[in-house]
């Protein structure tokens, strides 16, 4: 039987030894392997085990010793490299911390000054506002069985924060949200609320209420479009771009408000929220299948059977209804929310990276998409119905230009109406000329 070679041609070394040999220095490994082989041959001759069996046995012993030495060398080298890497990371982290965000973009200021998005005397106030962090806010689900206890809890937490942290960092109700269902911190953003240990107690309460469906963590500005819809329990409602679902859950909640009001007034003792479903319904649509999973999970927090989720391009949403409940052949809705995809440059208070990435061309590719969604929404709207178009962008290409295009095409068939008055909120109708 031929001898097993411990050095030389790598084809004579088995697969485990090849991996070990690559991790060690070849010169040292071969020298150690040669010494082990020579020692094995001498031992075989002295013991009188001559022949192929003795040589094979001694070869295995030499191989075993070589493996052990290689393992020790590799382990020691890996350990040293790990310690060196950790020290390098620590030194690098100390020497190069994260650079602070720079809330400046000359192109942004020049562009929106030219667009006159606010009066000149309010420009400095506008810029100072968008450079501050967006305050955290929550919305109470009024259709939840214990919604009053949730409001009482928020009032208690608000009083406690006023005593401990002062009015600037306390939780306050949004005056323009009815029934005290909207609450917001004055200066505390969601990042601080999540990381600051001083908010540990209230964070635990909010997580528990969110888990059982008592409230939804939602930005205050995100609550406005649904308020403008003026939802009634008999309405058929379409949310064209629904994910992640905070506005959809608000619509579902408002469908039950009539039942809650009737229960409080004593007009109908059977109108229990959650037990007496509304006659209307909500179809929540999104084009992305993965985002619809998030949407479905969010809607499960509101115990309502009046919800259906679809995955379709909003600009191609079906128009026909072959077997309508009253013989209808066309699917139409009383209320439609078109919260369309946008560049999102109105979210700089929470997305600080937009200061670095913003450019005026970001809206060019979105205008046609937004216009297509709005066209299909108007085709799905019932005569006398209401459609709310909303974006997170300040760009006139995504806002006024889209509205102007449909007004020009549809003429007297549609009417542009101002938003309803909100107590404690100032709303101005923008009459700017875009450039």
Image: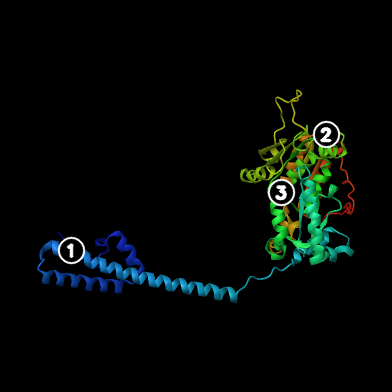
Determine the residue located farthest toward the top in the rendered image: 327
Residue drawn at (84%, 58%) of the image:
117
Mark 1 or 2: the one toward you: 2
* Left or right placement of residue 422 versus residue 286 in this view: right
Q: Quadrant of residue 229?
A: top right
Q: Is residue 262 left or right of residue 25?
A: right
Q: Which residue is mark 3?
A: 341
Residue situated in front as seen by the camera: 115 or 79: 79
Choose mark 3 or mark 1, whichever is in front: 1
Specify whether 90 is left or right of 76: right
Q: How is the image coloured?
A: rainbow
Q: Which residue is mark 1?
A: 57
* Residue 241 higher or lower than 236, as above or below: below
- Report the residue marked by disc 2: 269
Name the residue: 10% across, 63% down: 51
Residue 368 appears in the figure: no
Displayed quadrant of residue 75: bottom left
Q: Residue at x 76, y 66 (%)?
A: 106
Q: Quadrant of the C terminus?
A: bottom right
* Figure quadrant of residue 101: bottom right
As helix, strand or loop, the secondary structure at mark 1 comes to helix
Residue 179 or 407: which is nearer the viewer?
Answer: 179
User: Who is closer to the viewer here, 55 or 417?
Assistant: 55
Please give the label number shown on residue 337.
none
Residue neighbourhood size for the residue with mark 3, other residues' Cα within 10 Å, grouped as few (<14), some (14–19), many (≥20): some
Secondary structure under badge 2? loop
Label 3's element? Answer: loop
């Amino acid at each position: 039987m031929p001898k097993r070679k411990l050095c030389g041609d790598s084809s004579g070394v088995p697969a485990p030894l090849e991996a070990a040999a690559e991790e060690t220095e070849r010169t040292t490994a071969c020298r150690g392997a040669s010494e082990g082989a020579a020692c094995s041959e001498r031992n075989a001759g002295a013991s009188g085990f001559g022949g192929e069996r003795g040589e094979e046995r001694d070869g295995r012993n030499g191989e075993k010793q070589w493996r052990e030495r290689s393992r020790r060398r590799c382990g020691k080298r890996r350990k040293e490299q790990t310690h060196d890497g950790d020290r390098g990371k620590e030194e690098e982290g100390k020497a190069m911390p994260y650079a602070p965000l720079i809330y400046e973009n000359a192109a942004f200021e020049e562009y929106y000054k030219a667009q006159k998005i606010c009066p000149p005397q309010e420009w400095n106030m506008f810029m100072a506002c968008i450079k501050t962090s967006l305050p955290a806010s929550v919305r109470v689900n009024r259709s939840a069985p214990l919604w009053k206890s949730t409001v009482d809890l928020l009032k208690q937490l608000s009083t406690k924060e006023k005593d401990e942290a002062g009015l600037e960092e306390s939780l306050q109700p949004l005056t323009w949200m009815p029934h005290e269902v909207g609450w917001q911190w004055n200066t505390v953003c969601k990042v601080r609320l999540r990381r600051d240990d001083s908010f540990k107690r209230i964070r635990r309460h909010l997580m528990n209420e969110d888990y059982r469906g008592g409230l939804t963590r939602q930005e205050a500005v995100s609550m406005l479009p649904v308020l403008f819809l003026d939802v009634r329990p008999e309405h058929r409602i379409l949310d064209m771009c629904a994910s992640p679902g905070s506005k959809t859950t608000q619509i579902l909640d408002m469908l039950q408000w009539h039942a809650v009001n009737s229960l409080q007034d004593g007009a109908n003792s059977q109108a229990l929220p959650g037990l007496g479903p509304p006659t209307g319904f909500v179809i929540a649509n999104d084009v992305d299948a993965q985002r619809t999973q998030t949407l479905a999970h969010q809607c499960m927090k509101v115990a309502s059977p009046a919800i259906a989720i679809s995955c379709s391009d909003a600009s191609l949403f079906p128009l026909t209804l072959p077997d309508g409940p009253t013989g209808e052949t066309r699917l139409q809705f009383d209320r439609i929310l078109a919260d369309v995809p946008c560049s999102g440059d109105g979210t700089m208070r929470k997305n600080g990276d937009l200061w670095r990435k913003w450019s005026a061309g970001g809206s060019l590719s979105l205008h046609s998409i937004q216009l297509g969604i709005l066209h299909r929404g108007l085709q799905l709207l019932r005569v006398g119905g209401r459609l709310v178009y909303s974006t997170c962008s300040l760009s006139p290409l995504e806002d006024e230009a889209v509205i102007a295009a449909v007004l020009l095409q549809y003429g007297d068939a549609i009417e542009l109406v101002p938003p309803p008055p909100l107590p404690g909120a100032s709303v101005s109708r923008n009459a700017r000329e875009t450039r």
